[in-house]
Amino acid sequence: MIINTNAFEIFDISMPITESMPVYKGKDYKRPIISIDGDFTTGSSYESRLELNLHTGTHLDTPLHMIEGGYTLEKLDLSKVVTKCKVLDLTKVGDRIRDKDLADLDINEGDFILLKTRNSFEDILETDFIFLDKSGANYLINKKIKGVGIDALGIERDQPNHETHIGLFTEDIIILEGLRLKDIDQGEYLLSAAPILIPGAEAAPLRAYLIR
């Protein structure tokens, strides 16, 4: 969704939450369940219920997701997720994002970057989605970025020991997953990606959007 005003544009980069949405590796237990608690046939109001894994759709991971004793959502500094960001076009990358794929891009210390890949265009989110491998993560760590988001349901796939997650978390780099970047051009934006506040949780859904 794109909202135009006289002063700026707002780009919704969130996945809709539905019972038929893509989930990580197609695991059925990760699919959200939406039910009705009451409607106008039973009372004077309409209320519904949502049951979902906290890593469903567009969400933020905290270090507890992969590191025992890592911090949880209430410790998140919101200035890290309401911030300037750069969308980087990596749609030509074949299988995974490596250090060599990032080497010629405009990435500087303190940046928050969003990785746009074929995931936003092709039906591969539950199978062979493009991810950030260990070498790509190490490149970003050495650049001392603030955060990274990707249009995959996981920032890594089938890596031993969760090397990408743990490397980024160890350097306190924010991780966003499940972004939708199909209609977003490479460039600079203002990002708003504040998660629902669930104290003690290792992740939470968010309504992410960009402003230009």
Image (cartoon, rainbow, N blue to C red):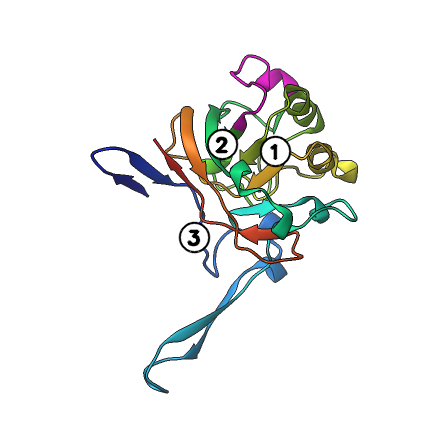
Q: Write the start and end of the magenta stretch as one range.
A: 98-112
> How far is mark 3 from mark 2, CA to CA?
19 Å
Q: Name the residue rendered at 59%, 58% in the picture.
A: 198
**Residue highlighted by disc 2:** 118
Frontmost of labels 1 and 2 is 1
Secondary structure of the residue carrying tag 2 is helix
Q: Nearer the viewer, mark 3 or mark 2?
A: 3
Q: Amino acid at mark 1?
A: Phe
Question: Is residue 109 a member of the stretch shown in magenta?
Answer: yes
Callout 3, which amino acid?
Pro
- Image quarter in which the C terminus is found: top left
The crowd level at tag 2 (other Cα within 10 Å; few <14, some 14-19, many 20+) is many
Looking at the image, residue 81 lies above or below residue 22: above
Q: Position of residue 38 (x, y in %)?
A: 41, 80
* Secondary structure beneath label 3: loop
List x then y, in percent, for residue 193: 48, 43
Mark 3 vs 2, N-terminal side: 3
Residue highlighted by disc 1: 131
Any part of residue 181 in sight: no
CA gap between label 1 and label 2 equals: 10 Å
Q: Which mark is residue 28?
A: none
Residue 60 within the segment the image draws in magenta: no
Q: Residue at x 79, y 48 (%)?
A: 68
How busy is the neighbourhood of tag 3: few (under 14 within 10 Å), some, or many (20 plus)?
A: few
Asked which quadrant contains residue 67, the reply is: top right
| Residue at point 33%, 38% (across, down) | 10
Q: Secondary structure at mark 1?
A: strand
Return the disc, 3 or 1, that comes first in the chain's sequence.
3
Q: Is residue 96 above or below residue 203?
A: above
The part of the image, by quadrant, that contains residue 39 is bottom left
Which is nearer the N-term, disc 1 or disc 2?
2
User: Residue 16: which numbered mark, if any?
Assistant: 3
